[in-house]
Amino acid sequence: MKKILILVLFISVILLVSCEKGIDSTTQTNPSTATTSSESTISNEITTTSISTLQTIEQETTIIDHEAIKSNVEDKIVFYKTKLIELSGLEEEMIESELSFNNNYNIMLLSTSYDEYNRDDLPEQVPFVYEGNGIDPEFIINTTFTINEYLAVLDLCEDFEEDSFMETSYDSFNYLIKTSVDGDQLYIESYRFYQDSGSDVFWADIMYFDMVDDKMIFKYVRDYNSSQHSIYYDEFSETGDAISIALDADNEELTYYQVFDRDINMTFDLSNTSIGGVYMNYNAIDGSIFYCIKIGEDESIIRHSIRYGSPTQFWYTNDEGEVYLTWNLYSASGWNKCRIYSSADDHIFMDDTEVLQDFTISISIQDVYANARFTTTEALFTESMMNLSDYGLYFAAVTYTQLQLDIDYIDQNFLSIINEYGLSLNMSDNYNNLISLFPFTSDSTVIEEISD
């Protein structure tokens, strides 16, 4: 209606000016009575002003389709959620089932009953297949849960706007959330707040997705402040490394860092705890070998743990002279029968003669493993013990010589391995180095706003 009134006004002004010009030209022919330059200027100004007013009114009446913008953001979120699940090798139905799972504990009655099997009747072991993508399934499950929450929250937001914080409530949380899409880039920044027994709980999540050469990049920062203040950063590249960082913001020495190193097909992680000691894991991506060591205050190794194969073939742990051993009995010869008890240790036999009577044995038909465990000391641990020849069996999947070579390797190289990843045994320095890798940080002013 405003446009019509302006248009009528504009036409009326033009007609008025035209009529005035017409009267002057018919009643006076003297050149001195012709239209002056000032009159022409006034006419032009009126015309320009009228057009400008029309354009402004037209812009003000442009309708923003908030639902279409929201739908575009939601579609992009679903796309990347699906992509993450595909790359993890998990099934979405399994993840959804896990998220809604309620623990139900069955009471097992103690019993001395057992089932007896010939070895040839036991199910065959199948080696685990590694996807080699560096994504932790538990991380994917938790991230999927958060993304599902985002979709539910966005559905509640009316007059949706991109790159602007919107406030709503969902599942006991007060939410501030901001999203934006630019081509393949998706950015989500959310803040969650609630009170737990009188204490304020803040969760800040910042996610960034992009596609480069049809390969996904995912960066995820979390800043969680409840009973303790912890910050996390996870980065995944479909073609590059995957890294995971966890830092205790209350105690700036407690750190955890892991990198999935595609170049050498190894994973490396370094961490410490409040009870002391630095822990390093250095594991082959294909599961062929796992090194785990604990480093004492004098920078020497005080605990070795080396595991071979997946499923495990042999596991050696030396904790300050106390030695713990695990064998995979599928890889040992000299037995042909077993008894599997419902609620007690299992036993193995050669015909009717029981062997490995001093060992703790556990066999599972369903999960397909047959493990024998034994505890000794470093002084008593020998080659004949490791190959089980002391007990009438024979085990050669991993040799004593190979184990000693691997112990020597990690002893001589653990410091250089740590240094290769830009870290040291000074965990306070590591904390500062790792926090500098965070691409985003939570906004304290937003946290203050949502808590008011």
Image (cartoon, rainbow, N blue to C red):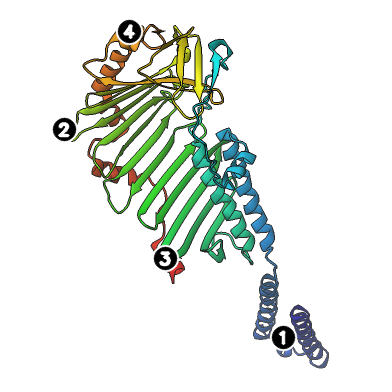
Nearer the viewer's eye, disc 3 or disc 2? Answer: 3
Location of residue 427 with respect to 4 vertically, above or below: above
**Residue 146 horizontal/vertical position (percent):** 54, 51
Mark 4 in CB contact with mark 3 (< 8 angstroms): no
Q: Distance between the residues labelled 3 and 2?
A: 43 Å
Name which residue type carries label 2.
Asp
Quadrant in which the N terminus appears: bottom right
Nearer the viewer's eye, disc 1 or disc 3? Answer: 3
Q: Which residue is located at x 40 percent, y 34 percent? A: 259
| Badge number at residue 390 | 4
Comes first in the chain, label 1 or label 2: 1
The residue where tag 2 is placed is 298
| Badge number at residue 35 | 1
Comes first in the chain, label 3 or label 2: 3
**For residue 402, which quarter of the picture?**
top left
Q: Which residue is located at x 48 percent, y 36 percent? A: 136
Mark 3 in CB contact with mark 2 (< 8 angstroms): no
**For residue 152, which quarter of the picture?**
bottom right
Name which residue type carries label 4.
Asp
Q: Distance between the residues labelled 1 and 3?
A: 83 Å
Q: How far apart are marks 4 and 2 (CA)?
A: 37 Å
Name which residue type carries label 1.
Thr
Mark 1 in CB contact with mark 4 (< 8 angstroms): no
Badge 4 density bin: few <14, some 14–19, many ≥20, Cα 10 Å: few
Comes first in the chain, label 4 or label 2: 2
